[in-house]
């Protein structure tokens, strides 16, 4: 009897095939909806916290935290369901010769393009809402390019984490149940916005928000900005009456009449500077390296899990 051999497509060709499939799903299965969603989220955040971004220390910390959260939210929603919703198909095609590395590579390329579009949309919306963005560059000659690269790395890192969860989950319901817990971890362990016990600080190295927030603060020259919270809180006591007089009100008037206010704000800022937010290219590059490293860790684990999909009896 004649012998027949089955020839499987190479990894590169399989990657192209699955990439085409993903683009068709983008067009015909409404996966494009993540783009207008990114615009809406960016608009809401710009309206809520964008007025003081890169203008004061407090506004910058809050604004960069919000920007990092936008990126994480976008990344999570991009890929949290993409693998688990077709788990049975992957199992069948893997038994027929599918290379898992090609399948994941197609997702990596597709998700990278999606993240780039979301970053562009976010920057355009922030600019339209007249949110101040970094005006000095550290890595490239263009500040917005530096800023966009940071947003991309945060979004893509979160995207690949969600891809890992999707590879781990059996159903879309399971994946969507896990996602809020991951989001809470990203928010709480951002390392800069919430005060954490010292023993919990090493855990912040595990989150994209920590490295994203740090890079965004450094790019905005956080330590050169004024700090206004001390002044604003003190100003609330200006009408305190002491023996029929208002000494604090008189002091504030004297300070403003002699143009000492800005000097005091900068002095307050000097006492609250953070070395990790210095305007330093080394800090930004370190943050980028951490984000890239975690991205590839997530991808490697996802590939390893999917390689065992034939043994999955769930």
Image: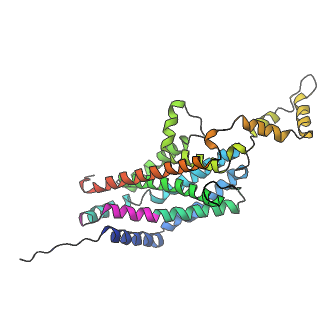
Q: Residue furthest left?
A: 1
The front one of 48 and 256 is 256
| Image side of residue 308 versus residue 123, left or right | left
Q: Residues in magenta?
A: 95-110
Q: Please provide percent x and percent y for residue 244.
A: 94, 25
Residue 256 placement: quadrant: top right
| Image side of residue 79 versus residue 12, left or right | right
Tell me which residue sits at (60%, 55%) in the image.
Answer: 139
The front one of 145 and 29 is 145
82 is within the stretch colored magenta = no
| Image side of residue 83 versus residue 223, left or right | left
Q: Please provide percent x and percent y for residue 50.
A: 69, 53
105 is within the stretch colored magenta = yes
Residue 151 placement: quadrant: bottom right
Quadrant placement of the N terminus? bottom left
Tell me which residue sits at (25%, 66%) in the image.
Answer: 97
User: In this view of the protein, can residue 232 be seen by the observer?
Assistant: no
The front one of 306 and 170 is 306
Above or below residue 169? Residue 1 is below
Q: Residue furthest bottom?
A: 2
Task: Name the dominant secondary structure of the magenta segment.
Answer: helix
Give the total of numbered labels. Answer: 0
Above or below residue 129? Residue 226 is above
Q: Please provide percent x and percent y for residue 214.
A: 59, 46
Above or below residue 4? Residue 168 is above
State how the image is colored.
rainbow
Tell me which residue sits at (37%, 58%) in the image.
Answer: 84
Q: Please provide percent x and percent y for residue 313.
A: 25, 52
The front one of 121 and 29 is 121
User: In this view of the protein, can residue 191 be seen by the observer?
Assistant: yes
């Amino acid at each position: 009897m004649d012998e027949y051999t089955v020839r499987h497509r190479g990894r590169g060709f399989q990657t192209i095939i699955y990439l085409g499939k993903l683009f068709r799903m983008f067009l015909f299965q409404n996966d494009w909806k993540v783009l207008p969603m990114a615009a809406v989220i960016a608009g809401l955040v710009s309206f809520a916290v964008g007025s003081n971004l890169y203008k004061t220390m407090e506004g910058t910390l809050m604004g960069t935290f919000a920007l990092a959260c936008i990126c994480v939210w976008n990344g999570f929603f991009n890929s949290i369901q993409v693998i688990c919703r077709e788990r049975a198909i992957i199992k069948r095609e893997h038994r027929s010769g599918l290379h898992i590395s090609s399948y994941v590579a197609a997702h990596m390329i597709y998700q990278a393009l999606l993240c780039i579009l979301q970053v562009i949309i976010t920057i355009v919306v922030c600019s339209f809402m007249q949110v101040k963005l970094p005006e000095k560059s550290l890595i490239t000659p263009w500040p917005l390019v530096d800023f966009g690269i940071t947003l991309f790395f945060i979004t893509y890192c979160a995207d690949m984490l969600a891809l890992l969860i999707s590879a781990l989950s059996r159903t879309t319901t399971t994946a969507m149940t896990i996602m809020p817990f991951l989001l809470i971890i990203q928010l709480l362990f951002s390392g800069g916005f919430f005060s954490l016990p010292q023993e919990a600080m090493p855990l912040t190295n595990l989150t994209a928000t920590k490295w994203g927030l740090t890079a965004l603060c450094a790019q905005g020259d956080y330590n050169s900005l004024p700090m206004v919270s001390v002044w604003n809180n003190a100003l609330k006591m200006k009408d305190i009456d002491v023996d029929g007089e208002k000494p604090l009100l008189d002091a504030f008037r004297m300070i403003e009449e002699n143009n000492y206010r800005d000097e005091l704000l900068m002095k307050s800022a000097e006492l609250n500077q953070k070395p990790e937010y210095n305007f330093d290219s080394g800090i930004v590059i370190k943050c980028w390296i951490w984000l890239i490293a975690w991205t590839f860790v997530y991808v490697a684990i996802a590939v390893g899990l999917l390689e065992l999909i034939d043994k999955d009896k769930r």
